[in-house]
Structures are given as C-alpha cells and as structure tokens.
C-alpha cells in the first residue's frame, strides 16, 4: 500500500477499496448502541474508551483506519496511534459520509445511529 506519509485522512471510497483488498484494518470507535444500529462489514469494534487497553492487539502489520459517526472521535484515535508510531488513518466524514456516498452497512437495513 502506498500513502503519502503526511496524509492521515482517507475518504470512504478509499477505505472501502483498501478494506476489500485486506490492506487495512478498519476500527469502529463508536459506542455499542451506534455499532448495533449499523456498521461497516468486517470492521473491528473497539469503543474509544477501550482503545488504550486494546492498543497492543490492534497494532500489527496492516495499517489501521479508524472511523466513528462523523470523524471527530476517530481523528483523535488516529492521531494518538500515529504519535505512538503506528500507521493509522482517519476516515473522513465518518459513517455519515460512508452512507452519503452509497456504501453499504450491515445488517441489512442498518443505519447511522443518532449521537
């Protein structure tokens, strides 16, 4: 995977493409009720308040792409992991942007939960 090392935001289509090829690990940092309402297939769910304890398990060979509802919480996560030397990215616009661009959620009929 080739990225500009200064780039740390990826648009939803790029995330979908990289995830489909298994090149990144998508991490959903939303609350459990948000995750239950609708989610990206295959994304790991680690609520923001549990990220620190899961950091060792998440940091691996593939880059991490964090997402939340609109991109604010996931930006914090991506910045923290990057500061720790992990190749991490934020999905621009979060799940709201993902849905606006016509990308799928699971389960069927899934939706973006109100925050």
Image: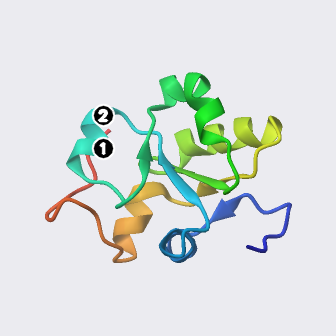
Give the side of residue 99 with respect to residue 89, left or right: left
Task: Locate the N terminus by quadrant.
Answer: bottom right
Give the side of residue 72 with respect to residue 94, left or right: right
Callout 2: SS: helix
Q: How is the image coloured?
A: rainbow
Q: Residue furthest left?
A: 109
Give the side of residue 50 with respect to residue 5, left or right: left
Q: Nearer the viewer, residue 49 or 59?
A: 59
Image location (x, y in percent) of residue 54: 56, 29
Total numbered labels placed on residues in the image: 2
Image location (x, y in percent) of residue 35: 30, 43
Query: In this rendering, is residue 14 above or below 98?
Result: below
> Are the residues flagged by discs 1 and 2 in contact, CB closer than 8 Å?
yes
Q: Residue at x 55, y 56 (%)?
A: 25
Q: Residue at x 57, y 75 (%)?
A: 14
Res 51 quadrant in image: top right
Q: Residue at x 47, y 39 (%)?
A: 29
Task: Locate the C terminus by quadrant.
Answer: top left
Instruction: Mark 1: give few (<14), some (14-19) or many (20+) Cα within 10 Å.
Output: many
Q: Is residue 115 visible?
A: yes
Give the side of residue 56 with respect to residue 95, left or right: right
Image location (x, y in percent) of residue 56: 65, 31
Image location (x, y in percent) of residue 4: 84, 69
Q: Residue at x 32, y 54 (%)?
A: 39
Residue bearing the label numbered 1: 35
Q: Is residue 114 visible?
A: no
Residue bearing the label numbered 2: 32
């Amino acid at each position: 995977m080739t990225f500009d090392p200064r780039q740390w935001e990826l648009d939803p289509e790029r995330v979908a493409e990289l995830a489909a090829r298994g090149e990144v690990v998508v991490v959903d940092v939303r609350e459990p009720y948000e995750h239950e309402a609708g989610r990206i297939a295959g994304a790991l769910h680690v609520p923001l308040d549990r990220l620190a304890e899961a950091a060792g398990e998440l940091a691996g060979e593939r880059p991490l792409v964090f997402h939340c509802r609109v991109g604010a919480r996931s930006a914090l996560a991506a910045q923290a992991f990057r500061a720790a030397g992990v190749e991490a990215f934020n999905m621009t616009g979060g799940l709201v942007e993902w849905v606006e661009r016509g990308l799928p959620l699971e389960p069927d009929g899934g939706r973006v939960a109100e925050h």
